[in-house]
Amino acid sequence: MSPPPFAARCAQQLTRIALALGAGACIAAPADGDWPTAARDAANTRFSPLAEITAANVSGLQLAWSFSTSVGKGHEAAPIVVGDTMFVVLPFPNRVIAFDLATPGAHVKWTFDPKPDPHAQGVACCDVVNRGAAAAGNRLFFTTLDNQVIALDTRSGTELWRARLGDLASGQSMTMAPIVVKDEVIVGNSGSDFGVRGFIAALAADTGHELWRAWSTGPDKDVRIGAGFLPFYAGDRGTDLGVATWPPEAWRIGGGSVDGWVSYDPELDLLFHGTGRPAPRNPTARPGANKWTSSLFARKAQTGDAVWAYQTSPHDRYGYDGSNENVLVSLTLAGRERRVLLHPDSNGLLYVIDRATGEVLTADPYSFVSTSRGVDPDSGALRYATDEVPAAGRVVRDSCPGSAGAKNWQPSAWSPRTQLLYVPYQDLCEDTDFFAASHIPGTPYLGAESKMHARAGASRGGFVAWDPARRRKAWWLPERFPVWSGALATAGDVVFYGTMDGWFKAVDARNGHALWKFRTVSGIVGQPVSYRGGDGHQYVAVMAGVGGWAGLIVANDLDARDGTAGGGFVNAMTDLPAATGRGGMLYVFRLR
Amino acid sequence: MSSGFARRTTVVLLAGMVAVIAGCQREERHFTATPVPADARAQADALAPQQAGPAGRGMREVAAAGSYDENSAYALAQGKKYYRWFNCIGCHAQGGGGTGPALMDASWIYGNKPGDVFTSIMDGRPGGMPSYRGRIPEKEAWELAAYVRSLSGLVPADAATNRADSLSGADPEGLRDPQRPEDKPRK
C-alpha cells in the first residue's frame, strides 16, 4: 500500500494530533508510537501521545531492559525510536547503536563508529556530549564532535554520506541534534567559548550537499538578511548590523554558535532557532550590541532567509545565550488565539513571542533573576538591572542567573492537555572576574573566569511547571542539584525527568506530586523519551551518565579546590562526586 | 650556660644568613640563553622519560632547557602570567581543570617531569591539548612548564608565586603540598 498523499496525511494528522497540539505540525508529526527526533516533533513539544502509563498506574513502572554504553562522559542524547528500532548516539567518540525492539531484551542490530578526530575533545567547552540523532525515511542523521554530519541507512547502519562543516583548528565543534525538514537536514555549530563564528546550515538529505548557510554575525548577506527581513523592533532594523554592532573585525570571531534546538512551523514555513553568546566573554572587549549573538531567528526553511530576529540579551554581559529551545504552541491570550513560541531563555526570562512577527508578548522570570528587570515593551530591549560596566580587574558579584543560565541546553516539554511548559532549571549565581582575552585559534576565547554558587536559602535547581497564559508557576519541585536532564510530557498526564544525583522521576503533570522514581547507576543529564514497543505497550527510555557542563567535576575528574574549574561550575558542585560516579547506561521501562 | 646560649645564637644566626643568601637565588634572572650543557642527551633523558617526537627534536628542547629554573621566583611569576595570556586558564582553570585535566592534583596523563610538561605544551597531546609550537617561544614555554608544576606544589615553596589574582579560592601555589602520583590514595 502506498502512503496517502501528503495533503491527506496532513489532514489525518491534523485531526488526530495537531489540533490537540495546537501546533499544526503535520509535516513532521510522527506516528504516535515513534520518537524520530530529539524533541519528537517539529514543534519541539517532547509530548508523547501515548497514554497507557498514567498517574494511577505509573507506580508499577519496571525496568524492561538496560544496556551499558562503556562511555564515562555526559550522556545528553535522546534515544530515537522509529518502528521497531531504537538508535542512540553516544558521547565522543560518537558511536551509534541500533537496538532491535522486536527481540526480547532488544538485541544490538548494528553499531557504527564514525572515528572522529580525537583532538575534538580539546575544543569541547562543556564535556564531549552529543544531543541525539534524527531519523527520516530510511536515513539516520547525526553530528560528530569533530564537525561532521553523517547519514546512515537505518536498516543496516551503512554510511550513506558524510559532510565536514568546519575546522577543529578554529575551535569549532558540533554537539547539536539535527532536525529534518522536507528534504533538508538542519545543523549548526558549537564553540562560542572558543571564538568561533556561529552558523546554521541546511544539507540535502540524500547527498549531504550544503544547500544554504546562515552565519550569526557579519554582513547581511552572510546572515541571510534581505528584503524579506522584517524584525518587530526598530533596534533590530538596519544595514549590516552584524558588522556595525562590533568593533572592527570582531564579528569574525564573535561566537553566536547554533548549538541548541531548531523547531519548524510548516504553516508559516519557518524555522526557529537561537544563537549562542558572544565571544569573548569579557564584554569590555566588544562594545556594541554584538548582533546577532544571544538572539532568536525565524528563517525560511528552503533558503535560510531571515524573516525576523530578536536579541534576547543585547551586548551580553553575563554569558547568556539564546540557544534554548523554542516550543511552538497556540495560546489564548486576552481572549485571542495566538500562534506563539515559548522560549525559556538562559537570562531567566520565559518569552512568549508571536512567532509570525517576532513580537514579545510577555517575558517573565521563571527562576530567580537579579541581572535584569524584564523587557521594555516598546523597544523590546532587555532592561539590565545595572548600568555598571564590567572592568578588568574588578569582580562582578552575585549575578543571578550565572553564565550557565537559569536554564542551559536542557530542553523543556509542553503538554497540550495541561497547557503547561515543564522546565528543568538551575538557580545559581556567579562572581566573575574580567581580564584581557587573547585570541588563539583552537583555544578558549574568554577573558573571564567565574565561580558559581547557590543562592542563600535556595536549592541549586529544580523542575518547574510554567503556565504561560497565566504567566506564573503552576508548581515546582526543588532538587538538590541543577536539573540538567530534558523533560518528557505524556498524554497519560505523567511527566518525567532525571536528576544529577541519579534518580529518574515520574511526577503528576497537573500538580507535581511524586509518583515513581528509579535509582540509576550514574546521574542523569539525558533526554527521556516514550515510544510504543513491538508488543504494543508504552515504554519510557532515558540514558544515564553524568557529565555535561554541570557534571564536569565527575566526567573530567576536576579538582574541587579550584572554584573556577569547569567554567566556574565546580564551585557549585563540589558534593557531586560523593553523590554519583561516571557510567553510561541506557534504561528502558514499561508497566509490569 | 651563657656560652652555650651564645653558641646556639651563633648557629641560628649563621643558619639564617645561609637561608638569606640561598633565598637571593630566587631572584636570579637569566638574560641570555644558557649554553647547551655538556651532556645534552643525558639531560634529555633526565627531563623527559617519555619524550615524544621525531629523533633530533629533543636536542633543540634541551638547548632551551637551560632556561628551565623552578628555583627562580621570576621564572615562575613569568610562567603564571603566560598561563593566563596563552589561555591555559580557559581549559585548565587555576589548576582545577575543565575541558582539559586538572593540573593541581597528583594525576598526570603524560607525566609531570619538566620535559613532559614542556612537550605537552609545545607538541600538544592526542586527547585534545593543542600544540603551542610557533605560538610560544621555547624559553617562555619552559617558564610556563615550571609554573604548571607549581600548581601541584612540585617546585620549591620559596620560589612559587604566593598571590592569587583569581577567584579560585585554592591555596596559593607556594602553600600547596607536593602532589605526586605515588601520594595518590589507592582506590
Image (cartoon, rainbow, N blue to C red):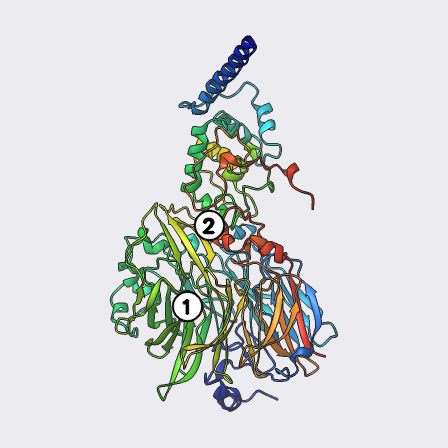
| Disc 1 chain ID | A
What chain does mark 2 sit on?
A: A
| Residue behind mark 2 | A169
Mark 2 to mark 1 CA distance (whole Å): 30 Å
Label 2 neighbour load within 10 Å: few <14, some 14-19, many 20+? some
A100 left or right of A142?
A: right
Residue that sits furthest to the front in the current view: B1
Query: At which x and y percent is residue A210?
Result: 45, 66
Image height of A2 relative to A355, above or below:
below
**x%, y% of residue A450?**
43, 51
Q: Residue lying furthest right in this view?
A: A104
Quadrant assignment for the N terminus of chain B: top right
In the rendered image of this protein, does residue A560 appear above or below residue B140? Answer: below
Q: Looking at the picture, which amino acid does disc 1 mark?
A: Asp
In front here: B116 or B157? B157
Q: Is residue A172 visible?
A: no
